[in-house]
Amino acid sequence: MKDQSLPITVGAAESSVSSRQGFRFARRLRRESPAMLIGYGVMYLLAALWVIPLLWMVWAAFMPKSETLNGWSWNFTLENFAHVWQAAPFAQYYLNTLLIAGGVLAVQLVTVTLASFAFARLNFWGRDIIFVLFLVQLMIPADVLIFPNYHVIKELNLLDTKLGIMAPFFVSAFGVFLLRQMFKQLPAELEEAAVMEGCSKIGLLARIYVPLSIPVYVSFAVVSISHQWNNFLWPLIITNSVENRPLTVGLAIFAQSFETGAQWADVSAATLLVIAPLLVLFMIFQQRFINSFMHAGIK
Amino acid sequence: MSSSVRSTLKENGFAWLLLLPSLVFLALFTLYPMWKTGKISFYQSDLATPIPTFTGWDNYSRMLDDSVFRQVIGNNLWFALATVPASILLGMVMAIFADKAIHAKSWVRVSFFYPNLIPMIAAANVWLFIYTPQYGLLSRITVWFNAEGMNLLGNPDTVMGALAFMMIWKEAGYFMIFYLAGLQNIPKDLYESANVDGVSRFVVFRRITFPLLMPTTLFVMIIALTNSFKLVDHLWIMTKGGPDNSSSLLLFYIFETAFSFYDQGMAGALTVVMIGILLILSCAQFFGLDKRIHYR
Amino acid sequence: MKFRAKLMLVLCMCVLFVAGCGTSGSKTGQGDTQQPKLESGANTEQVASEGEQTELSFYYPIAVGGPLTSVIEKMTEEFTKENPDIKVKPIYTGSYADTTTKVQAGVQAKQPPDVAVLLTTELYSMIDSNAVIPLDDFIAKEDPSYIEDFYPAFMSNAQSEGKTYSIPFQRSTIVLYYNKDAFKKAGLDPEKPPANWDELVTAAKQLNQNGQSGIEIPGSGFAYWMFQLLSLQNSPDGGNLMSPDGKKVFFDTPENVEALQYWVDLTKKHKVMPEGILDWATVPSDFLAEKTAMIIHTTGNLTNIKNSAAFDFGVAFLPMNKQYGSPTGGGNFYVFKDIEPKKQEAAWKFIKFMTEPERAAQWSIDTGYVAVRKSAYETDVMKQYTQDFPLAVVARDQLEHAHAELSTHNNGRVSKALSDQVQAALTGTIDPAGALKKAQEEANKALEPFNK
């Protein structure tokens, strides 16, 4: 709105998409300068470096416990997984984590969309002050407020429920902040055109802002889900029943064994159990996430 | 005149309506507990005083005399300096690369991003196994180069570096996600025309990619900064803040004060200080940069 | 007009969504949590009439890393079978630290557990925050043989100023683990582990070869605990680091400086221990990986090492100096204050059940902890176990020389003051005398309010 120096329309952006996909591997390689090729090499190396801890973990998880500490063993075993699996009702924990993460995300999407639209596109009194209040939530690690929040959940009679675990996360300053940046970036012409066609502000939000921001929604969803997937102390403190507890509680049995010291084979196996579904989901969705955006403008 | 007043009113009412659901939860689970925390910071409330007594600024002045507090603040600033710029830069480079990679694109993305999916307590265990002298992964590798194995975590001079590296590993892929989303938002025809004009890649990055990623960068900067104060779970597993507090961070010290010392007053005061630091730094970035970013 | 209508619509949808989500969410919540709901109902209305079941919530940590939740659950089921009027709900609460946090949250919100296993060192914190009850009335009703059957070393951490506040459950102590194969290789007698400080140094020097260090003592996290054992061994009169009432500590005595100097010298002078702070969690793995020939660590490791060691190993008394000595460690049962007396009584019954000799024996075998009662070692199951695995009794025999773990008022601050300075001395930033003087000053400051 403020800066009109880059008057780009969505149509122009999407027309380039197909031509971009037309590049062939070999053709592109030839086009690159030697400096770029070195850069590519470095980045592939970095990717390889980054994946080492995962490989290390996979190796430790599938090797017999006593053999992980000496040399390189290749005696494949599933014993660690069997040992870990019987320590906690992981199937129930999966379900709980899915319900919690899904529930939180569903509510967040609504609250965050509405709030970001207000911050990005509406002028109202006290906007900056309210925004700072949201920022406060971004600054506070939720676990610092465990004692007062425990009180609130108790007063609401939600102790030991999934809703009690979820409620503090129903609004995400993080999401508001992220989406506000996105909404502000969308071209003002879109809004003007839509208003001329008689579209109300809500229609504008639903038909233009939300569809155009899908990549941002997807990245927010990834972050929100992985946050709930990792959440440990808060669910542990406010729940007492297996029926309400998330996966991390099962993981903690092995990750925090202070009498015996580190149990790497077990920890690695338990961690793989916990992250495998997310890893697969991410592999599927990161492709979709790009595609969904590419087609978003065309509809 | 009156119609413009009415439309202002309307816009105000509409905005507040949109904010209402968020504000309810924000008030219940952030603002109210925060207010309580601020209040208890003016009370002495520890094991010696079962009934909290008002002591004014006493907790704050005791805090300034506390050498451990000064040390953890120093540690935390060091830690932020070591992790924030590095992980932002890496995140951006990773995103540009993961967006353009010629080969194995999704594999590259997954390998950068997966650290984010591993719960911190598990990641800490894995890295403990990597850093362990003699049979840890790092030692096994350094042995090939005939280098002396080092006890990185047990030495006050190296412990922070080792933890900072782990944090960059964990965080960079997280920021990559936002940059990936930001990149999709840059009109492709800008690159096309730059290509036609034969502008070099570096200039393209400096004149097009980097400026247009600024809103994302602002966002990521604030998240990275707050994260450098907020992520401490690994300390429980790896060092417990040692040796002699040399790896302790502010939030870890807050947890120690609240959960191990039972000193709610001091923990409240420390929390207020932490929020204060983060809020000032973020607002400076935010109100300083937001006005200068060119939103379209 | 159109705008306003739409606005109303959106608002309604928004409210409906939030409300709808709320009800559906709480419905699943209710379905899942019948029992706690009932329990809290009974709590507030106090309608628990005769013949109705008393429900106990029982918080317990797991600190040995294993599938033990099912063992505890089985035990509580057996308890209900024996006592149909009491139902125990076992609640796994993470590590000891997590458990303490959960208990604190509950105590502050006036919703404490009924019974919990916490570190014995939480004793004064629990008393000072007015959270637990003394158990003397219950003990008085029992036969005196019950309480006398517990090892005195374990009971000393449960008592303060003449009252007993907790009952031992999963207790440990520190022992010396040594690699018999390495002893043979180094020309040492594998059946004669070092018996005193000098022998330890000599043996460690001989063992310190081929990338294997002589000995490792962990210094992270629980540095105060390891220091306490050296301090106890070097004490001329059997005195501990703190006064029995938990109001004074004696860190900076000349004997303690000697003890800390000994630890520092293992690395700096004798070079038989690796440089830097050795991590608590990796020291046992170093032993299993044969990177060190001896370690000093908790008995909680016994089962783990037994299952994983690829070599012949031994367990021995800690080497003595002026005397044998070790602090104890681990967790006790506590009963909470803000609950109905009926529940407290039921909690006592439960504690008694959990500490019955057979159960104490079985728990010790399953976990590697020391069984807390003398009679546990007279049970058939334990006799069989110790016959097959004689090393399991070393820790028990050493109990005769064991003392209370460092536990004072304001314990978190006091033990951290000591741990920090011990680490500073070990990494060479300060000399042992200066370190202990500083630790003493900080501890005095933390204890000042309790000495008024």
Image (cartoon, coloured by chain):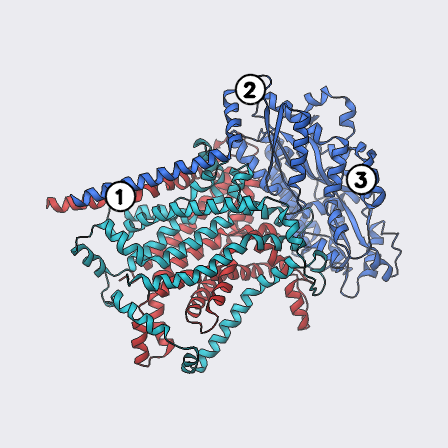
Chain colours: A cyan, B red, C blue
Residue C203 appears left or right of C26: right
| Protein chain holding label 2 | C
For the view shown, which residue lies furthest in the top direction? C50
The numbered mark at residue C10 is: 1
Q: Nearer the viewer, mark 3 or mark 2?
A: 2
Q: CA distance from mark 3 to mark 2?
A: 43 Å
Q: Which corner quadrant holds the C terminus of chain C?
A: top right
CA neighbours of label 2 inside 10 A, class few (<14), some (14 to 19), many (20+): some
- Mark 1 chain: C
* Residue C428, picture quadrant: bottom right
Q: Which mark is residue C48?
A: 2
Sort mark 3 into few (<14), some (14-19) or many (20+) by Cα contacts within 10 Å: many
Q: Secondary structure at mark 3?
A: helix
Residue B174 horizontal/vertical position (percent): 46, 59
Whole-angstrom CA distance, mark 2 to mark 1, is 48 Å
State the image coordinates of residue C268 (x, y, percent, origin top left): 74, 59
Earlier along the polypeptide chain: callout 2 or callout 1? 1
The disc placed on residue C396 is 3
The reply to the same-chain question for discs 1 and 3 is yes
Quarter of the image where the N terminus of chain C is located: top left
- As shown in the figure, which amino acid type bears the numbered disc 3? Arg
- The verdict on a common chain for dots 2 and 1 is yes
N-term mark: 3 or 2: 2
At 13% from the left and 47% from the top, the residue drawn is B4
Decide: is B2 above or below B200: above
